[in-house]
Image: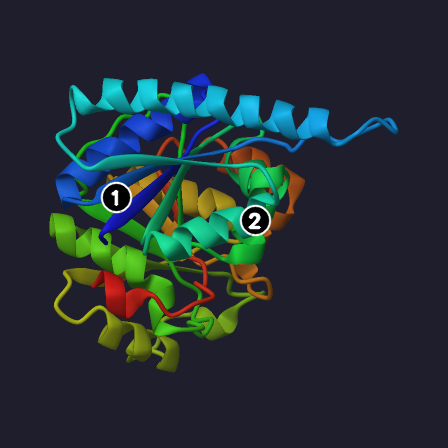
Amino acid sequence: MKTIIACTDFSHNATNAVLYAAALAKATEARLVLFHHFNYPVQATDLSVVFPNIFVGEMAAGFEHKLQELKDDLAQSYPIEIEYVVRSWDLPNDLDEVFQSKEAGLVVMGMHGQNAVANALYGSVTSAAIRRGKLPLLVVPRGVVFHPLKKILFPFDDHAIPKTETVQALQDLAIAFDAYIEVFTLFDLKKTPELVPQGGLSAAKRYLEALLTGIRHGYSYENESAVDKGILYEAARSGADMVAMIPHHHSFLSNLFNRSETQRVAASIMLPLLVLGETPYDIYAAIK
């Protein structure tokens, strides 16, 4: 990937994610784009719109100054190309537009508050940008620092991969670090007997096998009725450095993102979580 976008609201968690993104950009020789979005002030009176427009301009200038300071600080430790973007209109569309115009391959953001992974993805304003834009997103838990990837746990439930580009970010990271991908299937003998390992690979896994050509990978299976607990256990047991997922809306993995109880468990994953979305425009020829 040529470009990584790091979202920041200047909070501690966001800054931690920016540092992770900067280290990742250095390791992969990518450009880093710092992205900040602020809410456009709503006019509540009949006064002229001149004041709000001036106010928005002043706000944008202030945020640009903060981003310049952050850029200068990062430049002291990370010899990479860094730029920044400020937007204030519609967050999902703005992030999509920046992702496309910068030919980005990944968006990085931190967890916010105690809702962590799932609520950061599906319960906040930022989540709307991810869900609507379907961008590849790397969520960095609080306090997690970058280190080169050796193993990526990839929970996979034989749901058809929508597009080859869906796994592009996973491929890019695995190739950049020569990381091993563990394709992990959870099955329940009562609920999902079709996922019980057979003599050969399923049609979905044969397709995935082709996508992972040239990348070190293997397959593992676990009988577990609780999806979230199974993923957490395997991530810890296998010594994974990252968890990658495709949050299908109609698969059993979607439970990890839709149930509040599972969201709380997902929040305890102290590993970067790569959410593989469907990029809505064909930019991959440009970033390979």
* Left-right relation of 20 to 223: left
Q: How far apart are marks 1 and 2 (CA)?
A: 35 Å
- Name the kind of residue labelled 2 in the image: Pro
Of label 1 and label 2, which has the lower sequence position? 2
- The residue lying toward the viewer, choosing from 147 and 195, is 147
Secondary structure category for the residue under label 1: helix
- The residue lying toward the viewer, choosing from 109 and 86, is 86
- Name the kind of residue labelled 1 in the image: Ser
Q: Residue furthest right?
A: 46
**Residue 120 placed where, x, y %?**
55, 37
The structure residue drawn at horizontal position 22% and vertical position 52%, both measured from the top left corner, is 2
Residue at label 2? 92
- The residue lying toward the viewer, choosing from 75 and 114, is 75
Badge 1 crowding class, 10 Å Cα cut-off, few under 14, some 14 to 19, many 20 or more, is few
The structure residue drawn at horizontal position 22% and vertical position 56%, both measured from the top left corner, is 172
Residue at label 1? 238
